[in-house]
Amino acid sequence: MLPKQEKIKKKPDTEQPGLFDKEDEKKRLAKKRKFVYIAMILTVGLSLSFWAYRSIKNFKMPTLNMPVSSPKTTSIKTTSNFTLPKDTNSTWSFFLKRIDTDSVIFQNNQDIIFSTQDLNSVLDKINQTDFITSSSYSSYLPQGLKIKEIVEENDSSFSYFSTITTPAQQLLLIIKITDSKDLTQAKNSIPDLINQLYWYSLQK
């Protein structure tokens, strides 16, 4: 009878390893899934890291356009073009040139200016004067310029002769108002016009 009992006991032992194999297989599958998830997370993380690095590397700070201070004016803004005064009550004449060259920067009705005197006589007359320290007509110009000026005036006309000396150039400026019905009002525009002509000369 003993051999039969041994056979009965050995039968469950032959079935038991199959259960352990299934559990081991489940564990292996779980480990594989876990490994796949970790690999995916690492791959996505590395991709995001490279993308962030490239974005930071190629990032450029925006440039700020700071406003540039302009010279003090009241009614006429400094531009690259000189604007003639809109005055129907007077005739305006302008002449602006560099003294050391034959370059005329701006002129308008210059025949009126030189109808009674030529360019050399104007220069001689200005050269005989002294540099000024202050003037209401050139008050809008930058500090540090060397300026000589002559003003001639009667009831209906006004003439302004000036040399403006900078380290880079020497300018001759003549402004003449004729046939004026309101000379006082016209003269109020002179400082703005001188300032505008000066900055206009720097563009030429």
Image (tube, helix red, strand yellow):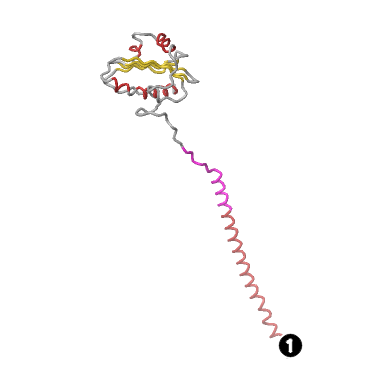
Query: Horizontal placement of 87 versus 34: left or right?
Result: left
Please state which of residues 187 and 201 is positioned toward the viewer in this rendering. 187
Residue pointed to by mark 1? 3
Residue 13 pos. (x, y %): 68, 80
Residue at the farthest right position = 2
Would you call the spot at circle 1 few (<14 residues within 10 Å), some (14-19), or many (20 or more)?
few
Q: Is residue 15 above or below residue 154?
A: below
Report if residue 123 lies within the magenta region: no
Q: Is residue 87 above or below residue 53?
A: above
Residue 9 pos. (x, y %): 69, 85
Q: Main secondary structure of the magenta part?
A: helix
In the rendered image, the quadrant that contains the C terminus is top left
Q: Is residue 190 above or below residue 8?
A: above
Please state which of residues 26 and 89 is positioned toward the viewer in this rendering. 89
Please state which of residues 128 and 115 is positioned toward the viewer in this rendering. 128
Which segment did they paint magenta? 46-64
Report if residue 60 lies within the magenta region: yes
Residue 26 pos. (x, y %): 61, 70
Q: Is residue 136 above or below residue 154?
A: below
Residue 122 pos. (x, y %): 40, 11
SS type, badge 1: helix
Q: Quadrant of residue 11?
A: bottom right
Q: Quadrant of residue 142?
A: top left
At a point 57% along the width and 51% down the height, the residue shown is: 49
Residue at the farthest bottom position = 1
Q: Which residue type carries mark 1?
A: Pro
At a point 34% along the width and 8% down the height, the residue shown is: 116
Query: Horizontal placement of 7 versus 73: left or right?
Result: right
